[in-house]
Image: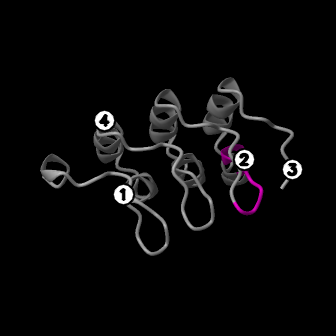
């Protein structure tokens, strides 16, 4: 309803997070898809310069990672800790997400 009344999907809150960050954090694939369909930016950054892909990889949501990558998320963007999404997937131990990121050219040699 908000989007149909002109709300912009990339607006940020005081922590510089936006609706797409929160949808990925909560694992709601349908909301992520809705926001991306309404010009949501998959590479938007929060206060710690985390992209939505960082959040999805950290949460271990393969379907959201795949959705973000297919909508232009860049797997090698680093957050303020100099970590890319692959760091978070590896730390969590989600091999399927690690493989997805690597197949989308995530750099396994990035140092944090």
Residue on which disc 4 sits: 37
Magenta region: which residues?
80-87
Inter-mark Cα distance, 2 to 4: 29 Å
Q: Secondary structure at mark 2?
A: helix
* Distance (Cα) linking label 1 and label 3: 29 Å
Q: Based on the displayed image, in which of its 4 quarters is residue 58 positioned?
A: bottom right
Label located before the other in sequence (1 or 2):
1
Q: Provide residue 59's location: percent of width, then percent of height.
A: 54, 54
What kind of element bears circle 3? loop
Question: Element type at marker 1?
Answer: helix
Q: Which residue is mark 1?
A: 19
Q: Are discs 2 and 4 less than 8 Å apart at CB?
A: no
Separation of marks 4 and 1 at Cα, in angstroms: 13 Å
The residue under the point 30% across, 47% down is: 31
Q: Quadrant of the C terminus?
A: bottom right
Q: Position of residue 101 (x, y in %)?
A: 65, 33
| Circle 4/circle 1 CB separation < 8 Å | no
Residue drawn at the location 87% of the way across and 50% of the way down: 111
Earlier residue among tags 3 and 4 = 4
> Mark 3 or 4, which is nearer the eye?
4
Query: Whole-Å distance between the Cαs marked 3 and 2?
Result: 13 Å
Disc 3 and disc 4: Cα gap in Å?
33 Å
User: Measured from the top left, where is residue 9 in percent x and y?
Assistant: 32, 51
Tell me which numbered mark, 4 or 1, is placed earlier along the sequence: 1
Furthest-bottom residue in this view: 14
Q: Main secondary structure of the magenta part?
A: loop
Vertical arrangement, residue 81 with respect to residue 103, above or below: below
- The mark that comes first in sequence, 1 or 3, is 1
- Determine which residue is flagged by label 3: 111
- Please state which of the two labelled residues, at mark 2 or mark 4, is closer to the viewer: 4
Could you say whether the residue bearing mark 4 is in a helix, strand or loop? helix
Q: Position of residue 37 (x, y in %)?
A: 31, 35
């Amino acid at each position: 309803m908000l989007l149909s009344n002109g709300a912009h999907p990339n607006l940020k809150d005081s922590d510089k997070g936006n609706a797409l960050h929160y949808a990925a954090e909560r694992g709601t694939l349908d909301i992520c898809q809705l926001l991306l369909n309404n010009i949501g930016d998959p590479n938007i950054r929060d206060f710690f310069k985390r992209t939505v892909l960082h959040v999805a990889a950290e949460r271990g949501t393969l379907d959201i990672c795949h959705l973000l990558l297919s909508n232009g998320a860049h797997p090698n963007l680093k957050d303020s800790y100099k970590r890319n999404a692959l760091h978070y997937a590896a730390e969590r131990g989600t091999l399927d997400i690690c493989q997805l990121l690597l197949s989308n050219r995530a750099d396994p040699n990035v140092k944090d």
